């Protein structure tokens, strides 16, 4: 299946959505998004890390240094309470957007 470009703002929601299951480092977030989308969505490093830093700056994520399963040092990100609230807002907005697009995409004679 071909890779798809993400709509602006979608990456933030996907990151927040991925982290709802618990803390994760950047590379694992990218892998989770790719795997969860059936290999359709691929997040590039040049987009992922600026997004993580932006979300951390907004207070939606907090980060700490830890060790991966491969014993490598990595920064782990997790949702904060405001991040969970933002995720709920993003999910509502996404549901409204996709419903509107679906209505427009319906073929009517």
Image: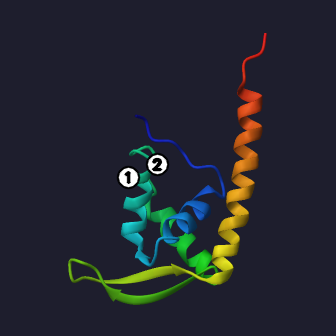
Q: Can the viewer see residue 19 in this picture? A: yes
User: Based on the displayed image, in which of its 4 quarters is residue 109 positioned?
Assistant: top right
Residue 90, given in percent of the width and then of the height, sits at: 69, 61
Left or right of 21? Residue 28 is left
Which residue does the image show at 70% across and 49% down from the upper left?
95
Above or below residue 30? Residue 35 is above
Q: Residue furthest top?
A: 109
52 or 97: which is nearer to us?
A: 97
Above or below residue 54? Residue 109 is above
Residue 30, given in percent of the width and then of the height, sits at: 41, 62
User: Based on the displayed image, in which of its 4 quarters is residue 16 positioned?
Assistant: bottom right
Which one is closest to the eye, mark 2 or mark 1? 1
59 or 91: which is nearer to us?
A: 91
Residue 6, given in percent of the width and then of the height, sits at: 57, 49
Which residue does the image show at 45% across and 57% down from the upper left?
33
C-alpha separation, residue under disc 2 versus residue under disc 1: 8 Å
For the N terminus, the quadrant is top left
Q: Can the viewer see residue 58 in this picture? A: no
Q: Which residue is mark 1?
A: 35
Residues at marks 2 and 1 touching, judged by CB atoms closer than 8 Å:
no
Crowd band around label 2 with a 10 angstrom C-alpha radius: few (<14), some (14–19), many (20+): many
Earlier residue among tags 2 and 1: 1
Residue 12, given in percent of the width and then of the height, sits at: 60, 64
Left or right of 6? Residue 66 is left
Above or below residue 36? Residue 100 is above
Which residue does the image show at 41% across and 75% down from the upper left?
24
Q: Report helix, strand or loop for mark 2.
A: loop
- Report the disc number at residue 41: 2
User: Based on the displayed image, in which of its 4 quarters is residue 13 positioned?
Assistant: bottom right
Q: Report helix, strand or loop for mark 1.
A: helix
């Amino acid at each position: 299946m071909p890779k798809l470009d993400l709509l602006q703002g979608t990456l933030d929601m996907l990151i927040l959505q991925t982290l709802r299951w618990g803390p994760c480092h950047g590379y694992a977030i990218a892998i989770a998004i790719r795997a969860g989308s059936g290999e359709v969505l691929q997040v590039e490093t040049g987009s992922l890390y600026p997004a993580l830093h932006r979300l951390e700056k907004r207070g939606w994520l907090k980060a700490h240094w830890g060790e991966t399963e491969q014993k490598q040092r990595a920064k782990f990100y997790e949702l904060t309470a405001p991040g969970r609230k933002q995720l709920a807002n993003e999910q509502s907005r996404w549901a409204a957007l996709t419903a509107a697009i679906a209505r427009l995409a319906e073929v009517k004679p």
